């Protein structure tokens, strides 16, 4: 096994040297292996009618993948020959509709209904929990439907089944109330690849603490690296919006996304990277990089830390589409198409460990001072941009990447290891 993995790595490296990373299979080699369950409309079509005040399209990964996988050549109408099974529930819109029932009509984030004396932060947290519970119930009910009406889930305890969890923290937001045994071994398609975050953040992955009595996995990993498929959040920018890194004019030159450890005691939502965001903004105000312009979009070669930059944000993918070298702050995250398909992020992304954020200016300056290195990164970026668009045209962008990942799952089912 070790040797096979090593050879695989060599093959990827030599392909890269020969002028770019390539798929290991051509498009469409694997056909007719994904069965899409035909669920009652309350799980998908009806949800499209639910009212929301705020619903960015980035949460519609579930809807666009349902549409795609229903008519793609990987689709089979015959479940008895299928290798993987898709349970299509529109959780993204459902989640937003649930908590926004308590929002002020003028501003989704102003949650002021049924607070029962709670202050605004606590009311917000409670209604978020209401949405997590409601979404979990919908997941539970979709699994029950599939279990009762078809034999396939029981045959594998769900290991060849998947759902799309399109909210920020994937299944840790949308199926959080499920116990592991309810979830089975189902895998997910999601945008969140933290290797450390778990469904119960208070229970550490390794050190569970004396007071925690363990009776089976009541806490589980939000992302299972050997099973789950990571994708960029949905955005409508297609092939024709790709801007070369060598285009003379652009409006965004650098974007960031942040990671920070849980429970650092500094922030309510440290795992979103909000705390590091604050530290970075303070840092840039104290010592701005020459030529930078904090908080404003501007022209070429001016690095900008934009707001709201977590992995689940659309911004890093927009940066790639618009020909910008992303600057990221990841400690322990997988990125889309990296682990199983060898997407070489290090070739075109500048990652800085969160602990080292004070190196930011020096690292950017070093890159600007090394035009040949910058050029190599821009060339690598240019070679890979087309894999990051939600566009069925051309070679299929993200849709084709997802199909290739599903092909790997179909062939690896017997070897997928649970990290629980
Ligand atoms: C969410 O569900 C749990 C049980 O799974 C319950 O204890 C909790 O009160 C619920 N929270 C809200 C806000 O509905
Ligand atoms: C699958 O197993 C569950 C019990 O875990 C059972 O209720 C259900 O009927 C089974 N489904 C089928 C199709 O046999
Ligand atoms: C940059 O933004 C300006 C103003 O919004 C717009 O007119 C221009 O077309 C943009 N340029 C590019 C390359 O996107
Ligand atoms: C930034 O600009 C100032 C004056 O414009 C200059 O004195 C300083 O050396 C520059 N710093 C760097 C790191 O280039």
Image (cartoon, helix red, strand yellow):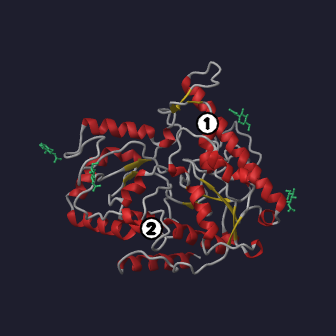
Determine whether, in the image, residue 416 is placed left or right of residue 374. Answer: right
Q: Secondary structure at mark 2?
A: helix
* Residue 381 falls in image quadrant: bottom left
Counting from the top left corner in percent of width and height, residue 366 is at: 23, 56
Instruction: Check residue 387 in the rendering and tell me which mark sits there, or answer none.
Output: 2
| Towards the viewer: 48 or 126 | 48
Q: Quadrant of the N terminus?
A: bottom right
Does 326 appear above or below 54? below
Q: Residue tagged by mark 1?
A: 99
Marks 1/2 in contact by CB < 8 Å: the verdict is no
Does 3 appear above or below 204? below
Q: Residue furthest top?
A: 117
Q: Quadrant of the C terminus?
A: bottom right
Does 243 appear above or below 79? above
> Could one spot residue 413 in this view of the protein?
yes
Q: Residue furthest front?
A: 49
Determine whether, in the image, residue 233 is placed left or right of residue 326. Answer: right
Q: Mark 1 vs mark 2: which is more N-terminal?
A: 1
- Select label 1 or label 2 by which is in front: 1
Counting from the top left corner in percent of width and height, residue 128 is at: 61, 36
Instruction: Check residue 417 in the rendering and tell me which mark sits there, or answer none.
Output: none
- Disc 2: CA contacts within 10 A as few (<14), some (14-19) or many (>=20): many
Determine whether, in the image, residue 115 is placed left or right of residue 251. Answer: right
Asked if ligand 3 lies within 8 A of label 2, the reply is: no
Residue at left offset 83%, top offset 61%: 149
Counting from the top left corner in percent of width and height, residue 124 is at: 58, 30
């Amino acid at each position: 096994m070790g040797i096979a993995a090593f050879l695989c790595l060599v093959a990827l490296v030599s392909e890269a040297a020969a002028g770019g990373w390539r798929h290991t299979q051509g498009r469409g080699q694997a056909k007719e292996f994904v069965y899409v369950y035909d669920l009652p409309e309350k799980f998908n079509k009806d949800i499209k009618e639910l009212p929301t005040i705020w619903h960015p399209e980035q949460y519609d990964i579930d809807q666009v993948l349902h549409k795609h996988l229903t008519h793609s050549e990987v689709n089979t109408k015959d479940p008895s020959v299928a290798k993987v099974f898709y349970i299509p529930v529109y959780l993204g819109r459902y989640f937003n509709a649930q908590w926004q029932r308590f929002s002020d009509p003028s501003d989704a984030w102003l949650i002021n209904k049924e607070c029962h004396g709670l202050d605004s932060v606590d009311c917000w947290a409670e209604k978020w929990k209401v949405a997590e519970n409601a979404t979990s119930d919908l997941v539970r009910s979709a699994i029950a439907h599939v279990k009762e009406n078809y034999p396939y889930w029981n045959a594998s305890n769900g290991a060849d089944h998947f759902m799309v969890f399109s909210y920020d923290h994937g299944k840790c937001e949308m199926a959080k109330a499920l116990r592991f045994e309810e979830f089975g071994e189902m895998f997910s398609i999601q945008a969140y690849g933290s290797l450390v975050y778990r469904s119960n953040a208070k229970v550490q992955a390794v050190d569970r603490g004396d007071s925690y009595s363990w009776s089976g996995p009541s806490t589980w990993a939000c992302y299972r690296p050997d099973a789950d498929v990571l994708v960029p959040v949905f955005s409508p920018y297609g092939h024709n919006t790709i801007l070369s890194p060598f285009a003379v004019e652009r409006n965004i030159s650098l974007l960031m996304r942040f990671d920070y450890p849980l429970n650092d005691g500094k922030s309510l939502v440290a795992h979103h990277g909000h705390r590091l965001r604050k530290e970075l903004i303070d840092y840039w105000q104290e010592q701005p990089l020459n030529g930078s312009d904090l908080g404003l979009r501007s022209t070429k070669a001016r690095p900008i830390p934009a707001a709201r930059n977590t992995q689940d944000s659309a911004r890093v993918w927009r940066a790639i589409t618009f020909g910008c070298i992303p600057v990221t702050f990841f400690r322990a995250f997988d990125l889309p198409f990296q682990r199983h398909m060898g997407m070489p992020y290090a070739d075109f992304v500048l990652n800085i460990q969160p602990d080292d954020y004070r190196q930011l200016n020096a690292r950017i300056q070093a890159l600007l001072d090394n035009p040949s290195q910058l050029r190599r990164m821009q060339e690598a970026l240019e070679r890979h941009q087309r894999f990051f668009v939600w566009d069925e045209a051309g070679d299929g962008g993200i849709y084709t990447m997802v199909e290739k990942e599903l092909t790997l799952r179909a062939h690896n089912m017997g070897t997928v290891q649970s990290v629980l």
